[in-house]
Image (cartoon, helix red, strand yellow):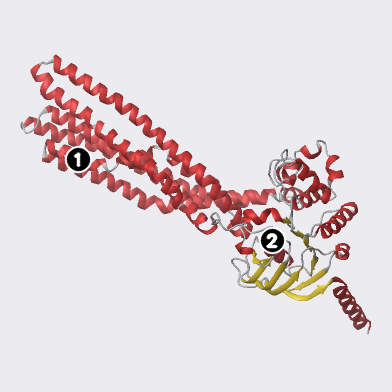
């Protein structure tokens, strides 16, 4: 966030300069009133009136132009905030969600929109004008000390009302935003299981739970809205009362000949201008508070998951993989999911990771891709700690198919090309599909590689999604391939295609790691790693591990028979 504010600093200086000149020009109408009542009317001087009209007309024209430019500058700042902050926030959102679902922040982009809207609202203009309250009060005091004291008291009352509004509503508004976000996330998360909800008649129960959360949010929102409306109404009432009070003081001074009628009118105009920013701040407090909360959330998100620091480029890896004493504790838990895992693979070797459910297989797969970082130990690719690689650089060399396949809204080619321009990379897209033995399946789709697949691949069958995900993982110059249950949704034809693809990758020298429950893929690997309760039970050449497993199976059968 600091580089962003450094870039915005000159724009804010420009905004402050425009605000300075604009507020100086706002003195002109008050001075015009003063001169008209004190000089023009008593002397019946038409010439003076024309000169004053010309001067105030010029000042108002300049004021219009400067006010317009200031508003345009505010919009420009909002656009710069969006353009500069969005890439960092998107990177942070992806990184946070990849490390743990608990860190997911799908509403972060709405926070950027909230922050950008601040620069289109009256609240920011009011904040820029607020320091001029002191100047306007000082000018009023020059007219007469009594008027100055009255204006100062009015300003203090209005500022006190704004402070009280903040004190009463800040925590409540934060709570409203939190409850609203939680209710929205609950529905968004539940929609991913829409088929289950519909098939098992759970929609009404979902609605009931959402309604409970939404009612809490609405209850808080109603209470804060009532408070905000009350403060806004009180602000307008107080401003009118202050205007009446100041007019009364001015009239009394005129009657006692301590001040002129021009002073009374000019004071009223200046006081209205002085109190206007405070009233706008009270009226825009909800927007200002939401922008402040959004900024804090974005700041914390970027501080923890911001863009990577530039790192020295490293050469293309051959694919040698070494895992030394890796342990991992998932965020928010005390129990280790993996403990003391070690293994090594030469470039081009294939490894099968097997074991019972919840043994840590998928966790190890995520660690091997570099998505997660080990709590203890190191994972090295070609001797370099994977945590020191730039994701931008290592990403093209890594292929990954997660256990739950997710595709992006777009065409088949868009997904295989990893969101690159599929037209520019047409040959690479076809080559990846061919490596994955998915080309024949893809060309049979209605539009072939240009077939839109819908959000998450909704227009495809699970097996088709799995095979396209395999092609995406094999796209480009992949040196490390990690497949987590890649045959979970494949039919017999798909499994044969996957086995052929793995054999082809071994021949190309690609290091492959397959998490599987099925024995059909084990015949195509060089080594096997057996995990149990997060620890390595056995690791070695596939033939040796298979013989050991067979012996253990025979021994177990013999023990049962006995």
Q: Which residue is mark 2?
A: 369
Q: Is residue 491 above or below residue 537?
A: above
Residue 427 vs residue 361, the one in the foreground: 427
For the residues carrying marks 1 and 2, which lies nearer the camera in this image? 2
Q: Which residue is mark 1?
A: 137
Q: Is residue 444 above or below residue 311?
A: above
What is the secondary structure assignment of the residue under circle 2?
A: helix
Left or right of 354 in this view: 338: left
Residue pictured at 40% horizontal, 51% vertical: 170
Q: Is residue 93 above or below residue 255?
A: below
Give how far across and how far down residue 354 sits, in percent.
80, 68
Give how far across and how far down residue 376 sits, in percent.
62, 73
Residue 217 vs residue 366, the one in the foreground: 366
Mark 2, other Cα within 10 Å: few <14 / some 14–19 / many ≥20: some
Q: Which mark is residue 202?
A: none
Q: Quadrant of residue 425?
A: top right
The residue positioned farthest toward the left in the image shown: 257
- Which corner quadrant holds the C terminus? bottom right
Residue pictured at 28% horizontal, 25% vertical: 60
């Amino acid at each position: 966030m600091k580089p962003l504010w450094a870039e915005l600093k000159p724009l804010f200086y420009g905004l402050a300069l425009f605000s300075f000149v604009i507020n100086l020009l706002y003195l002109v109408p008050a001075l015009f009133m003063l001169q008209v009542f004190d000089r023009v009317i008593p002397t019946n001087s038409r010439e003076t009136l024309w000169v004053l009209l010309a001067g105030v007309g010029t000042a108002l024209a300049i004021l219009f132009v400067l006010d317009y430019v200031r508003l345009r500058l505010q919009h420009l700042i909002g656009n710069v905030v969006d353009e500069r902050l969005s890439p960092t926030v998107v990177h942070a959102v992806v990184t946070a969600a990849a490390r743990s679902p608990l860190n997911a922040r799908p509403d972060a982009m709405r926070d950027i929109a909230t922050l950008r809207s601040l620069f289109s609202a009256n609240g920011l203009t009011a904040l820029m004008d607020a320091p001029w309250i002191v100047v306007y009060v000082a000018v009023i005091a020059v007219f007469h000390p009594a008027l100055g004291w009255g204006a100062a008291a009015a300003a203090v009352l209005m500022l006190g009302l704004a402070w009280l509004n903040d004190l009463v509503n800040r925590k409540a508004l934060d709570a409203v935003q939190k409850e609203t976000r939680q209710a929205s996330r609950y529905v968004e998360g539940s929609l991913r299981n829409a088929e289950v909800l519909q098939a098992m008649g759970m929609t009404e129960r979902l609605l009931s739970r959402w309604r409970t959360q939404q009612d809490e949010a609405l209850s808080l929102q109603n209470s804060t809205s009532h408070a905000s409306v009350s403060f806004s109404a009180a602000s307008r009432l107080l401003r009118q009362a202050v205007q009446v009070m100041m007019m009364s003081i001015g009239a009394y001074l005129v009657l006692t000949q301590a001040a002129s009628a021009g002073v009374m009118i000019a004071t009223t105009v200046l006081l209205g201008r002085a109190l206007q920013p405070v009233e706008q701040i009270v009226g825009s407090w909800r927007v200002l508070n939401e922008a402040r909360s959004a900024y804090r959330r974005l700041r914390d998100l970027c501080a923890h998951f911001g863009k990577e620091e530039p790192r020295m480029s490293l050469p293309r890896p051959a694919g040698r993989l070494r895992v030394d004493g890796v342990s991992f504790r998932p965020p928010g838990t005390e129990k280790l999911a993996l403990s003391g895992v070690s293994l090594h693979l030469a470039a081009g070797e294939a490894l099968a990771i097997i074991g019972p459910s919840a043994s840590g297989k998928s966790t190890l797969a995520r660690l091997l891709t570099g998505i997660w970082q080990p709590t203890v130990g190191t994972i090295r690719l070609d001797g370099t700690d994977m945590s020191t690689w730039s994701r931008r650089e290592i990403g093209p060399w890594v292929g990954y198919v997660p256990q739950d396949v997710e595709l992006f809204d777009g065409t088949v080619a868009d997904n295989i090309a990893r969101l690159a321009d599929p037209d520019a990379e047409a040959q690479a897209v076809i080559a990846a599909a061919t490596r994955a033995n998915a080309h024949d399946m893809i060309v049979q789709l209605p539009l072939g590689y240009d077939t839109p697949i819908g959000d998450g691949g909704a227009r495809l069958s699970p097996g088709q999604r799995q095979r396209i995900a395999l092609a995406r993982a094999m796209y480009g110059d992949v040196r490390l391939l990690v497949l987590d249950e890649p045959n979970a949704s494949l039919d017999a034809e798909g499994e044969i295609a996957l086995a052929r693809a793995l054999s082809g990758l071994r021949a190309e020298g690609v290091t492959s790691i397959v998490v599987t429950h099925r024995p059909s893929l084990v015949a195509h690997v060089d080594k096997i790693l057996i995990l149990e309760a997060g620890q390595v039970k056995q690791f070695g050449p596939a033939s040796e591990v298979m013989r050991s497993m067979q012996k253990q199976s025979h021994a177990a059968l013999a023990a049962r028979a006995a």
